[in-house]
Amino acid sequence: MGKKIMVVDDALFMRKVIRKNLEECGYTEVFEACDGEQALEQYDVCSPDLVLLDITMPGISGLEVLEEIEKRDPGARVVMCSAVGQEQMIQKAVMLGARDFIVKPFRPDEFRRIIRNAMES
């Protein structure tokens, strides 16, 4: 598909699940970051078309990463990933510029729909 996607999550298992779902959708250029600091370093290097960003991470939070990415690249496509019960965080993320959000655990069909919409917007 030629689109680059960066997956940012402190849980290796979740990064693997997301990567598998992306690959099943045809995305082959998938980059991973295990925390916010690594995400910001890699963002400038790989210039992803889409970032899937966990909200709750040690160190720099997903919301802080989102704010920094938006400063660097106001047209960035970021989809937040959060666990059930983080509705206030999701609302704040959308106000900060996130295109959408995925609630973990997610259903594959819902995941595909959100990714497709984010890539088209």
Image (cartoon, grey):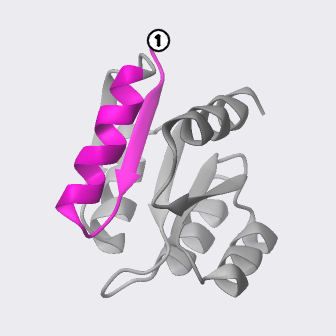
The reply, left or right, for residue 98 in relation to residue 3 is right
Q: Is residue 46 above or below residue 35?
A: above
- Judged left or right of residue 11, residue 82 is right
Q: Return the x and y of residue 54 as percentages of the image width and height.
A: 45, 67
Residue for badge 1: 1
Q: In this view, does 70 lie to the left or right of 61?
A: right
Rendered position, 4 above or below 86: above
In magenta, the rendered stretch is 1-24
Tell me if residue 25 is in the magenta stretch: no
Residue 50 in picture, x, y percent from top left: 54, 40
Q: Where is 41 relative to 93, above or below?
A: above
Residue sitting at 65 percent across and 40 percent down? 114
x and y percent of residue 60 in the render? 39, 83
**Residue sitting at x 70%, y 54%:** 100
The three-letter amino acid code for the residue at tag 1 is Met
Residue drawn 36% across and 39% down?
46
Quadrant where the C terminus sits is top right
Asked which secondary structure carries label 1, the reply is loop
